[in-house]
Amino acid sequence: MFTIRDVKETDREVLFAMEKEFYEGPACDHTVPEENFEATLKECLRSRQYARMLMLEDETGVVGYFNMSLTWSNEAGGQTVLLEELFFKPEARGKGYGTKVFAWVEEEYPDAKRYRLEATPCNEKAIALYKRLGYEGLDYYQMIKER
């Protein structure tokens, strides 16, 4: 049985280990300092207003995590759910859990006008899943300015 639940303080150790693996894998092209994990966990425990961290479990225990942000988009004309991070431990991959996470998001946020995510070009399996679920590529060049 696959379940999705909000993160708890007691998830810290297993969550941080998975986040580290996520940022060292093909889903991301850079690492993130662990203090960012701490800040995100703190915010997600404080409020679900604009960030939410979810733990993914099956009968074996925690098998992954999912991080999302909520925002308003003028371009989309309403709420946008930013699907920030989706990670499964290797033994949980290929079981259809990713599809279940995306179905959960659409059920949990039915009034969202847009669901948005990003992927590194080399993460081909993830991109194939996203396309199968109806996601389309954007011809945007993304830019950031760190502070």
Image: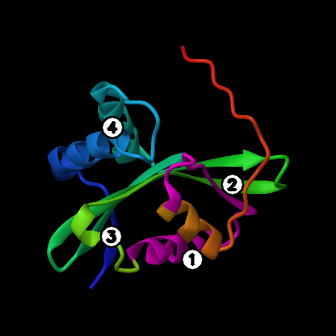
Question: To which residue does mark 2 refer?
Answer: 80
Specify the segment rendered in magenta: 97-124
Relative image position of residue 67 (x, y in whole percent): 44, 52
- In the rendered structure, which amino acid carries the disc numbered 4? Lys
Q: CA distance from mark 2 to mark 1?
A: 14 Å
Q: Earlier in the sequence, mark 1 or mark 4?
A: 4
In the rendering, at what x and y percent does residue 99 appear?
Answer: 48, 76
Residue that label 3 marks: 93
Q: CA distance from mark 1 to mark 4?
A: 25 Å
Asked if the stretch drawn in magenta spans residue 98, the answer is yes
Sequence-first tag of 1 and 3: 3
Helix, strand or loop status at disc 4 = helix
Q: Earlier in the sequence, mark 2 or mark 1?
A: 2
Tell us which disc is closer to us: 3 or 2: 3
Mark 4–mark 3 Cα distance, whole angstroms, equals: 28 Å
Tag 2: amino acid: Thr
- On the rendered image, what quadrant is the N terminus found in? bottom left
- What is the CA distance from the residue labelled 3 to the residue labelled 2? 27 Å
Residue 138, horizontal then vertical, whole percent: 76, 51
Mark 4 or mark 3, whichever is nearer to me: 3
Residue at image mark 4: 42
Question: Alpha carbon of mark 1 to alpha carbon of mark 3: how far?
Answer: 22 Å
Q: Is residue 65 above or below residue 142?
A: below
